[in-house]
Image: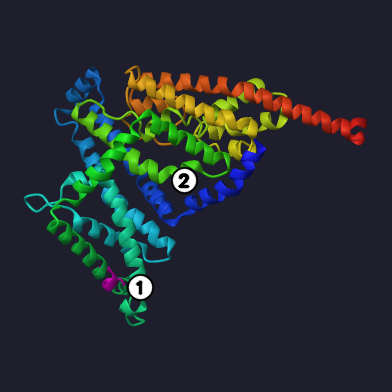
Amino acid sequence: MNKIIGVLEKYFVPFAGRIGAQRHLVAIRDGFVTIMPLMILGSFATLINALPIDAYQSFMKSVFGENWTMFGGVLWQGTFAIVSLLVAFTIAYSLAKSYDKDGLSSGVVSIAALLSIMATTKDGGFPLSWASATGLFVAIFVALVSTEIFTRLLGNSKLNIKMPDGVPPAVSKSFAALLPAMITLTIFGLIKVITVKLGIPDLHQALYDLLQAPIAKLANTLWSAIVIAIVNHFLWFFGLHGSNILEPLMQAVYLPAINENIAALKAGAEIPNIVTKSFFDGFVYLGGSGATIGLLIAILISGRKHKQYKDLSKLSVAPGLFNINEPVVFGLPIVLNPILFIPFILTPLVLTILSYLAIATGIVPKTVVLLPWTTPPIIGGVVATASWKGGVLAAINLVISIIIYIPFIKMAERAFLKKENEQLHADPIQRAK
């Protein structure tokens, strides 16, 4: 085991670390994190409108009238309905700032580039569907490419229009970005013209059919959920922030999935997707990656002879209730700990399979709310599914996580006590004490 860990630490960890620090992936992650409060607001607004309880619906109509859902609809329209436009700006902004360039101008150019390649409706407007999560893949691609072009041109002094010293900084920045912005948008305009000439009038639809739809279909399977769970925790074991490294993938693939669920709930249709980001946050990552709230409880139950474990678990319970588990992962530690490696991987794997089967068989409803990742365990299951059944599943998962961790905690405790005894017998000074 130690040899395997040594090889992986030598070759895999540096490679994974470079991926996690790659500026484009970081820009995607930070871009999505910026708009997350809006996404959570939009999902709750839809839930308030479409909560499938007849008594609740009748009550709201009697109190607020037939048009009581208008307020929630307006909130959805300003959040989920334009998520692609929002990330086109925030990703471009984050990427430009990583180059120490003008983030604001980059974000504006990114939105303009995205709209320039978007197919228009018959009346000359923009289809709202591609501004939503359905158009995320294209929005991410345009944000990255347009910013690369724009920042490279912005760094060329020959293309910068310099204003006199007395001109306000905002005006100087605007003129400095003029020619780079014109060239960038011209490139995207030519892309649009060329694709139309090639018989592709709607670039969004073509890329959706080619890439996004097949990936989304594949992502909504048990096997894909298992792969995500394993990779995330495998990275964590080596001290790499698995959640952050996988966040661009989680947002690009599973945000459209929860958006489809929310739209189906809003329309009163069948909820399509089992695996969403809320699926992992509500049922698998209980207390954080590895379901470590179960680990803490297991320590309090069976690890009382191990003072380090006992003291750390008491300090980590409070943040663990809000899914903050870095103190456990690095303080226990779980990182590069061969004994805890098995339950740290096994627990989320079991919870993923159990949760998927419970939802697939209809025992527990599918997730319909974008869950804030800091939502406490069990409560998260209720909120994500808008049903007490989700809370029951999360509670069962918590109990299972405790059961899985207990024997390994006892094993780690025995190993610790054995090592302590060996040191005591080997050190005459300690033995005398």
Which quarter of the rendering shows the N terminus?
A: top right
- Of residues 259 and 234, the one nearer the viewer is 234
Residue at figure coordinates x 42%, y 44% from the top left: 247
Q: Which residues are magenta?
A: 177-181
Residue at figure coordinates x 13%, y 53% from the top left: 199
Name the residue tied to disc 2: 245
User: Principal SS element in the magenta part?
Assistant: helix
What mark, if any, has residue 169 been given in the picture? 1
**Image height check: is 217 above or below 101?**
above
Which element type, helix, strand or loop, lies under badge 2? helix
- The answer to whether residue 426 is left or right of residue 195 is right
The image quadrant that residue 190 belongs to is: bottom left
The image quadrant that residue 214 belongs to is: top left
Q: Amino acid at mark 2?
A: Ile
Which element type, helix, strand or loop, lies under badge 1? helix
Q: Position of residue 108 (x, y in %)?
A: 28, 61
Which quarter of the rendering shows the C terminus?
A: top right
Q: Earlier in the sequence, mark 1 or mark 2?
A: 1
